[in-house]
Amino acid sequence: MIDFCRWLLSLNQRGVKKLGGLPFTDFEMENFRGLDRFREICKAVHSKHYPDAFHFWTAEVNGMDFFLRA
């Protein structure tokens, strides 16, 4: 999961545009274009907490009103 988060963080706008040819939904592509927010969250945590940051970000982009962490 940490490697996946690092991959997301490594994507720039050019990399995101390359993903446009793959079978992603409009919603998923919009999230790729909004990776700056994920980067912002990740700046505040150690890389071992990237999975938590990813879960927080996905809750945020899905409009969740609450985030429960066990």
Image (cartoon, rainbow, N blue to C red):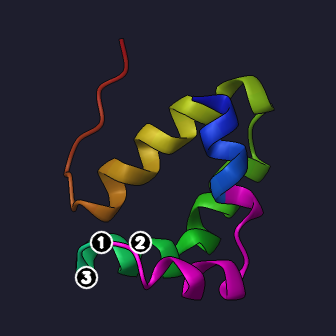
Earlier sequence position, callout 3 versus callout 2: 3
Q: Is residue 20 above or below residue 56?
A: below
Element class at badge 2:
helix
Tell me, yes or no, whether the highlighted magenta stretch contains residue 43: no
Q: Which mark is residue 31?
A: 2
Q: Nearer the viewer, mark 1 or mark 3?
A: 1
Q: Amino acid at mark 3?
A: Asp
At x 66% / y 27%, what residue is drawn? 49
Q: Amino acid at mark 1?
A: Pro
- The percent coordinates of residue 32 (x first, y second) are 49, 73
The residue wearing badge 3 is 26
- The percent coordinates of residue 12 (x first, y second) are 73, 78
First to last magenta residue range:
9-24
Q: Quadrant of residue 1?
A: top right
Q: Is residue 60 above or below residue 56?
A: below
Element class at badge 1:
loop
In the rendered view, does 61 fall on the left or right side of 40?
Answer: left
At x 78% / y 32%, what residue is drawn? 47
Nearer-the-camera pick, 19 or 12: 19
The residue wearing badge 1 is 23
